[in-house]
Amino acid sequence: MKKAIICSFTLFILLVANAQNKPAYVLYNAKGKKVSYGKMIKQLVQQDIVLIGEFHNNPISHWMELEITKDCKKQKSLVLGAEMFEQDNQPALDIYLQGKLSPKGLDSAARLWKNYTTDYAPLVNFAKENNIVFAASNVPRRYAAMVSKGGFEALDTLSVKEKTWIAPLPIAYDAELPGYKNMLSMMPGHASVNLPKAQAIKDATMAYFILKYFVPGHLFIHYNGSYHSENHDGIVWHLKHSKPDIKILTVTTVSQKDIKNLLAENKSKADYIICVDEDMTTTY
């Protein structure tokens, strides 16, 4: 009996050791040094705003968003916000958070992403259960499409009501920002100069509503696609443009074949980098 217990314990240790040798992700700082999750949380709660850049179909991104949110809530009051909700859907989201609308009702009243149920509902329901404000920060997509075709000038045709769902005009814009320049270089000769402007109206609008819903003394956690905040670009630039002294940290997701060391190209993409095995299954 004693030998059986010892053998079982030895097998358990071997299985745990083997699992630790095949992690799903590794957490790094901007310099590419491995850091602990606890150390990251300790820094995040000292900020005003944390932007979490995700891969929209990556389960590790979504799991980490929820875990980070839960653990920050233990130490600081929160406000949440997400790219995945457009500002004209704020009323429906608010009613749902107040318990006056069912999940099916929210699905009917708001333009939910196809992976909402698996990937974003846990965040929204956490906010609902804990009475946390959740901002629908993104520009209605039809307005981004207008900018893509006709530039920022196309927004001048919007009604007074519609303009409340976007960042105030005129939109601050720097065409030389690396993220915007890269959008053009990725499609040389084919991309319109308005393409990065469509990205900018999203970044500017998200930054505007983050600041609108920000509460001093609280931590605002925002969930967005990684490209919107990588390299402290995009949303970060617009936040700093409006409020230079605000304290911001960024988290992003990258994917590598070998996650034991962070590739040079992925360093400095964010203050904290979730490096995920590229073989990780996707949610869609």
Image (cartoon, rainbow, N blue to C red):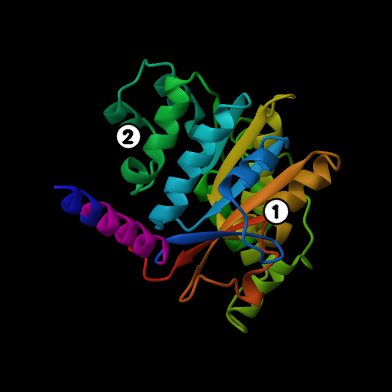
* Most distant residue in the left direction: 1
Disc 1 crowd, CA 10 A, few/some/many (<14, 14-19, 20+): few
Residue 162: where, in percent of width, then height? 59, 35
Q: Is the residue 104 above or below the residue 268 in the image?
A: above
Closest to the observer, 108 or 274: 274
Q: CA distance from mark 2 to mark 1?
A: 32 Å
Dot placed on the residue nearer the N-terminal end, 2 or 1: 2
Asked whether 17 falls inside the magenta stretch, the response is yes
Residue 13 part of the magenta-drawn span: yes
Give the magenta range.
8-21
SS class of the residue under badge 2? Answer: helix
In screen coordinates, is 153 left or right of 221?
right
**Residue 14: image location, x then y, percent:** 32, 62
Q: In the structure shown, which secondary structural element does the residue marked by tag 1 occupy?
A: helix
Q: Which mark is residue 190?
A: none
Residue 153 circle label: 1
Say the numbered circle drawn on residue 107. 2
